Image (cartoon, rainbow, N blue to C red):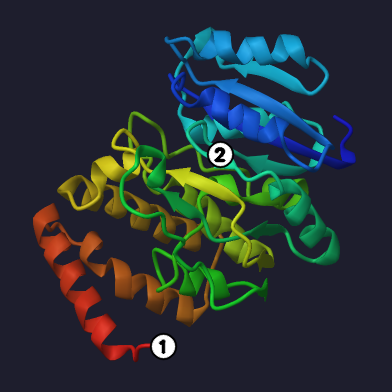
């Protein structure tokens, strides 16, 4: 498929997202940057999500397309993002989760940064954790890097969650060049809804961090909707989070070995965070060990 150099392909996977889907799509349609196409990927929805998506396609068939898995199966967000990328035409790829929203200048800001930093394979910024949509506690924007600049491998792997002290961006913040996306093989499809999926974005970022320079901007360009049905909220503070972390760190160790990483700093960081997951310890024990290590680390780091 021929690629269009100045086009951004927006991939929006959804599964039973009728409550939020219109708001997510509208945040793409209202972008100040006009050169985009939207690929709506139905991940086996059984509610009115399909009807909503097809309504947008009928109104803008040249800009918005609908795709689904064979048999309308639920294949998970990683396979759905990859399917959307496979069916897109832009030189840039952006991703939007169906319960998040973009700010109107998201694409305009990030495309300009990519054009000004040709060596960057990806750009992202700090995500706004959006609680106020329900009238709950105040929103917050955790830092994702020491400052706005281009970071070369493997800095962000070592200093971002889950190996480092800085938070990770949400997938709705990513803008990535297609060649950088293809270089790492897209999102890792081992993270499926029938196995483990909490750290699928961390796995993808780990691959990018090892293979491409990344420009981190100070601009927040999206709202990550915080709600009790999200997998992040369902697992926070529970022993099931330890199961997800164990799966991720075992995946990361296997990936580093497979690509022949020899960097001692990387392996020290992985062992520091993951050694307990490579032992046959129950989840409640690894949770206690992790919390203790985090307390000690916070005491050792001077406050800024």
Q: Earlier in the sequence, mark 1 or mark 2?
A: 2
Residue 142 at x, y = what percent?
A: 44, 64
In the image, 182 versus 139, the foreground residue is 139
Residue 190 at x, y = what percent?
A: 44, 39
Query: Residue at 40% across / 49% down in the picture?
Result: 199
Q: Which residue is disc 2 drawn over? A: 101
Residue 269 visible, this orientation: yes
Query: Residue at 53% across / 24% down in the picture?
Result: 21
185 vs 108, left or right, is left
Query: Residue at 83% across / 19% down in the picture?
Result: 62
Q: Residues within 10 Å of mark 1 (few under 14, many from 20)?
A: few
Residue 112 drawn above or below residue 98: below
In the image, 142 versus 44, the foreground residue is 142
Figure quadrant of the C terminus: bottom left
239 vs 200, left or right, is left
- Mark drawn on residue 256: none
Q: How many marks?
A: 2
* Res 10 → quadrant: top right
Q: Secondary structure at mark 1?
A: loop
Residue 282 visible, this orientation: no
* Res 246 → quadrant: bottom left
Q: Which residue is disc 1 drawn over? A: 304
Residue 110 at x, y = what percent?
A: 73, 55
Q: Secondary structure at mark 2?
A: strand
Report how far apart the C-alphas of labels 1 and 2 lie in the structure: 32 Å
């Amino acid at each position: 498929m021929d690629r269009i150099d100045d086009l951004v392909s927006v991939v929006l996977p959804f599964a039973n997202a009728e409550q939020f889907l219109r708001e997510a799509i509208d945040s793409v349609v209202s972008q100040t940057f006009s050169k985009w196409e939207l690929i709506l990927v139905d991940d086996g929805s059984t509610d009115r999500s399909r009807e909503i998506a097809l309504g947008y396609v009928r109104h803008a068939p040249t800009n918005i397309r609908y795709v689904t898995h064979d048999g309308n199966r639920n294949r998970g967000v990683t396979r759905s993002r990859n399917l959307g990328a496979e069916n897109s035409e832009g030189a840039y790829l952006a991703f939007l989760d169906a319960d998040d929203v973009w700010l109107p200048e998201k694409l305009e800001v990030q495309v300009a940064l990519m054009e000004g930093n040709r060596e960057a394979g990806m750009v992202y910024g700090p995500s706004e954790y959006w609680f106020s949509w329900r009238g709950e506690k105040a929103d917050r924007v955790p830092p994702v890097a020491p400052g706005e600049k281009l970071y070369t491998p493997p800095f962000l792997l070592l200093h971002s969650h889950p190996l480092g002290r800085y938070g990770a961006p949400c997938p709705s913040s990513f803008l990535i060049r297609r060649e950088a996306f293809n270089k790492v093989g897209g999102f890792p499809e081992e993270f499926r809804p029938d196995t483990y999926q909490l750290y699928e974005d961390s796995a993808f970022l780990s691959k990018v961090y090892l293979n491409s320079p990344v420009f981190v901007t100070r601009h927040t360009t999206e709202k990550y909707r915080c709600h009790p049905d999200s997998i992040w909220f369902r697992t926070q503070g529970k022993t099931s989070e330890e199961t997800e972390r164990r799966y991720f760190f075992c995946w990361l160790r296997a990936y580093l070995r497979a690509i022949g990483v020899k960097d001692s700093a990387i392996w020290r960081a992985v062992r520091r965070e993951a050694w307990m997951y490579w032992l046959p310890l129950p989840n409640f024990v690894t949770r206690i060990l992790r919390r203790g290590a985090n307390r000690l680390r916070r005491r050792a780091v001077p406050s800024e």
